[in-house]
Every structure is written in C-alpha cells, then in structure tokens.
Image (cartoon, rainbow, N blue to C red):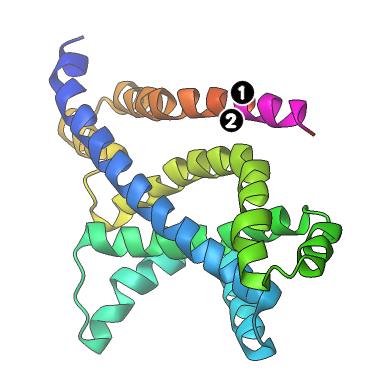
Amino acid sequence: MEVVLQYLGPIGQGMLVTVALTVLGTVLALIIGLFGALARLYGPWPLRAVVGAYVEVIRGTPQILQLFAVFFGLTQYGIQLDAFTAAAIWLSAYGGAYAVELFRAGLHSIPHEQREASAALGISRWTTLRKVILPQALATILPAMVSFLVLQVKNSSLAFTIGVMDIMRRAELGVNATSQATLLYLMAVAAYFILNFPLSRLGIALERRVAQYR
C-alpha cells in the first residue's frame, strides 16, 4: 500500500502526459488522414501514388523502428527533437496512415447518386464534397474514430522507450527504484484502463446511434 500511495502522483502525472501526447497525435493524424484520403480519391495520380506509398510503408514497418527513426535518425541531419515532440510526430504519422483508410472508407460509403444529383443541380464538386458528402462520411465513421482514439492511447505507450514521461515511463522508474514490478505495472494497466474504458463505451454508444439512422 505504501508503494501505491507513493506512486499515485507520478502515475497520475504520467496520465496527463499520455493524454496530451494522444490528443496532439490524434488531432494531427486525423488532419493527415482527411487530406490524405481526399488526395487518394480525388487527386492526380502522382499524389495518389505518394499517399498510397506512405500508407503502405507505415502499415508495413514496425512501430518502434518508425519512432526511433524520428527521434534518433533525424539527429544525423541536424534536427534535434525532444522526446515528446518526436513521439508526437511519430504518433501523428503512424496514426495518419490508418486515418487515411478510415476517411477513405467513409467517403466510399456515400452513394454515388448523391454526387450525380448535386452535379445535375449545378452544385460544384467542391461544394458537394464539403456540404453533402463529407458531413455524412464523418457521421458514418464517428464510432470508428473513437476506436481509433483508443488505439492511439495504447500506441502512445511506446513513447517511454525514448524517455517520454508517460504512464509507462513513470511505472518503469518506479520499478527500478522499488523492484515492485507487478504492483507498479498493474497501476499502469489501471491508468490505461481508466483512460480507455469511457472511450470504448462511447464508441459502442455511437455505433448504436449510427445504426438507428441507417
């Protein structure tokens, strides 16, 4: 119990870092995903090829190597990043590759007849996309976006390997100081569960809500 009380504060501080990293990484990932999906669906073929290659490389290589490439690799080119910034860049890039496919699936789910009807009414392609297609696509993929956020929380745990003071790093420091590995890692498990359980329930609720309108 003494160890639990001693490390409640540090683990709580680690949760704040995890939340900050996840929010920043996810917001940037969704921006990358949206524009990447639009580029892959509507852009010229060279741009589609670049986005497609980005998605395949990110999805086909280990996460830890990507993170190390950002944090350690860029130093060889004179780019010195602190651990949190490097982790945020990696989480954004990694999540962005998956968000591209998430948005692309949502855009594909909207019937093509809606585009044809808008064109028949003289509505421009951009206006149709912005006011007709995209809002419906976002509503469709909203539950999946919540699940994506849960995955980003879990993915952020790799940041401890480069020294980010997140939940995992705080637990690791506690283990090194006290040798209470089981107890401290269970505290880390509880911290991640506290963050992710409400998000999981929200995702389920949104899935039910969306299903009602299909």
Instruction: Identify the image quadrant of residue 206.
Output: top right
Name the chief secondary structure element in magenta: helix
Give above or below for 146 relative to 113: above
Position of residue 158 relative to residue 83, above or below, is above
> Which of the labelled discs sits on residue 203, or is there none?
2
Closest to the observer: 10 or 21? 21
In the rendering, at what x and y percent does residue 112 appear?
A: 83, 61
Residue 15 falls left or right of residue 59: left
Report if residue 195 lies within the magenta region.
Answer: no
Q: Is mark 1 on a helix, strand or loop?
A: helix
Quadrant of the snapshot with the N terminus: top left
Task: Examine the structure image and report whether residue 210 is included in the region drawn in magenta.
Answer: yes
The tally of labels here is 2
What span is colored magenta in the figure? 205-213
Badges 1 and 2: C-beta atoms under 8 Å apart?
Answer: yes
Amino acid type of the residue that numbered disc 2 sits on in the rendered structure: Gly
The reply to whether residue 80 is in sight is yes
